[in-house]
Amino acid sequence: MLVSSSTGQLTASFYDVSCPADAQATVKKVIRQALQTDSRIGASLLRLHFHDCFVNGCDGSILLDDTSSFTGDKTAPPNLNSARGFDVVDTIKTQLESACNGTVSCADILAIAARDAVVLDGGPSWTVQLGRRDSTTASFNTAKNDIPSPALTGLYTQDMVTLSGAHTIGQARCSSFSGRLYNFSGTGKPDTIIDKTFLANLQQQCPQGGNANQLQPLDLGTPRSFDNQYYRNLQANKGLLNSDEVLYSTSGTTNSLVVSYAGNQNTFFDSFQSAMIKLANISPLTGTSGQIRENRRVVNS
């Protein structure tokens, strides 16, 4: 299970007095506008929150640009040329700084944005606890080592199986899964688990020597809807990433969870809500720790 630890108290009503302009409404408004021109942005914002929390907790470190004193999360392999949505965070931050400067942290913006992105794509809602503060540094090596790889195999906890359901929206580059199509685990052959028709389609879209940055939907069935189709895809051996497909192909807890979520969307939604609350509470900076960044890109001077 995900382990959350806190150095202070988070509360859903944290900004009720300090930001009467309604910080959460501002975040949702900006995301709604962004979705009108970029259908991928919901998945991108959700992924930013995931990758932020997996590295030293939910502290907004993924938003920091590299400096002379540290090389941060943004340029680590799991994020380089794939993490996106920073411009939307900039817009949100600018509007909130205008309404109630020095109040709403970048870490809280990511937590709220992840929830609203799911809702606006048709998924469940949950109460976001607020009051996180922002880190003053970031870590390339921790991001490189702690963010789960698309090629990962093995057993997952219940929370990780549930959070993997976020792949019901979004896209992945050919480079993230091409090994499964041509040379799985060094065999010189495709992954035998993949549905043959699905494999042929992927090989056509991602030919050997082709554009490694070509995008494919993580959920071929309903790529723009947050639903339980992702788990149904796994049952049909149509999981795009290896880390997806092993959830079903491996017998035991992960397999049974896939079956449960594929059969009942409400069960998945209930579990996803709980897992997201746990994720957002991993090691937040509170009280006097960290700071409230004025600009998401840089530490306050």
Image (cartoon, grey):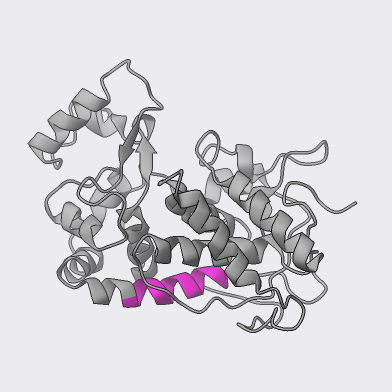
Question: Where residue 84 sits in the image (x, y, percent)?
Answer: 54, 43
- What range of the chain is rendered magenta? 270-283
Q: Is residue 185 visible?
A: no
* Mark count: 0
Which image quarter: residue 273?
A: bottom left
State the residue at coordinates (14%, 48%).
Answer: 237
Question: Where residue 192 sits in the image (x, y, percent)?
Answer: 13, 37
State the residue at coordinates (9%, 35%).
Answer: 197
Q: Is residue 124 visible?
A: yes
**Could you tell me which quadrant the N terminus lies in?**
bottom left
In screen coordinates, is 101 left or right of 186?
Answer: right
In screen coordinates, is 217 left or right of 191?
Answer: right
Between 213 and 21, the one nearer to me in the picture: 21
State the residue at coordinates (79%, 64%).
Answer: 290
Q: Is residue 123 magenta?
A: no
Q: Main secondary structure of the magenta part?
A: helix
Between 243 and 267, the one nearer to me in the picture: 267
Is residue 15 positioned above or below 152 on the image?
A: below
State the residue at coordinates (82%, 36%).
Answer: 68
Question: Where residue 218 sits in the image (x, y, percent)?
Answer: 30, 45
Question: Residue pushed farthest top?
Answer: 209
Question: Residue pushed farthest left?
Answer: 196
Question: Where residue 297 sits in the image (x, y, percent)?
Answer: 73, 46
In screen coordinates, is 97 left or right of 72?
Answer: right
Is residue 112 positioned above or below 41 on the image?
A: below
In screen coordinates, is 84 left or right of 273?
Answer: right
Which image quarter: residue 9?
A: bottom right
